[in-house]
Image (cartoon, rainbow, N blue to C red):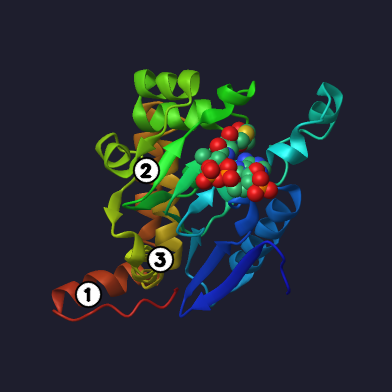
Amino acid sequence: MPYENILVETRGRVGLITLNRPKALNALCVALIDELGKALDAFEADDEIGAIVLTGSEKAFAAGADIKEMAGKSYMDAYLQDFITKGWQRVSTVRKPIIAAVNGYALGGGCEVAMMCDFILAGDTAKFGQPEITIGTIPGAGGTQRLTRFVGKSKAMEMCLTGRQMDAAEAERCGLVSRIVPAADLVDEAVKTADRIAGMSRPVVMMAKEAVDAAFDTTLTHGLMFERRLFHSTFATEDQKEGMSAFAEKRQPNFKNR
Ligand code: CAA
């Protein structure tokens, strides 16, 4: 399917989506979000794909929602269109693992989309921020909620109230990103990581993802119960039998459900 604002390719069992609106630093216009949703739907439906990587350019993962597109919206437009929720949420509802590979700016909606992914790998040039306050608005795609859960109240509050950006080193220190790699190696490293995940049992990967996600939404008691139930269900899979037999037999597992 031809896209205008994104590039889509497969690398083995990994689906790679590259935001590609260089003239606007990958600002997330409606058309781009629509295309991103379609590409995610296609990878989600494709049995050959075990994990997804979402990236941008060396200069920008994405510099936010498209300011020029939204500038003239009325309250009623925003409310009736459920502006920012519609379409964007698709990133956070993907059931296959999705890694954000961030080089350059991940600002506003860019930071929010990266945080909707399962984890963020950062190039050493990455810069994260929620600068909405500097243009007279606030984050509208989860920035006040997800950033606070990632980095704690003090830092999230400072970033949302001042628009200050954090560099990759600070983002790693405070747990926003899982690790930093040289910018030039970022996409290859993200694909390698996604490929490793795609080599595991897909249902078990999905259960692990669901269990970690539950930690954001529930009490410890309920989260532990949910984890235990999913843990029990892994014992109903052929892949658990294969994984544990392979360990005992000192060989690599050959998971059937990948
Ligand atoms: N929307 C629309 N266009 C944007 C954009 C955005 N978010 N960010 C950059 N662009 C455009 C610029 O207007 C410029 O276009 P022209 O050449 O046609 O003028 C082009 O991209 C290049 O940008 P700059 O010349 O500004 O590049 P720079 O290197 O000097 O600065 C930057 C880079 C610091 C990222 C700067 O572009 C910037 O501050 N961008 C806006 C960041 C921002 O405020 N993001 C939050 C948006 S609101 C939001 O996301 C709401 C939400 O919660 C969902």
Check residue 233 in the rendering and tell me which mark sits there, or answer none.
Answer: none
Marks 1 and 2 sit apart, C-alpha to C-alpha, by: 23 Å
Contact (CB < 8 A) between labels 1 and 2?
A: no
Q: Residue at x 41, y 29 (%)?
A: 149
Q: Does 61 sit left or right of 248 as displayed? A: right
Dot 2 falls on a residue whose secondary structure is: helix
In primary-sequence order, the first of circles 1 and 3 is: 3
Q: Nearer the viewer, residue 189 or 149?
A: 189
According to the picture, the residue beneath numbered tag 3 turns out to be: 187
- Residue 24 placement (x, y as % from top left): 64, 51
Marks 2 and 3 sit apart, C-alpha to C-alpha, by: 31 Å
According to the picture, the residue beneath numbered tag 1 turns out to be: 245
According to the picture, the residue beneath numbered tag 2 turns out to be: 227
Dot 3 crowding, Cα within 10 Å, few <14, some 14–19, many 20+: many
Q: Residue at x 45, y 74 (%)?
A: 257
Tell me which amino acid carries mark 2: Glu
Q: Is residue 31 above or below residue 170?
A: below
- Residue 208 placement (x, y as % from top left): 39, 52
Corner quadrant of residue 157: top left
Tell me which amino acid carries mark 1: Ser
Does residue 111 appear in this view? no
Corner quadrant of residue 84: top right
Q: Quadrant of the N terminus?
A: bottom right
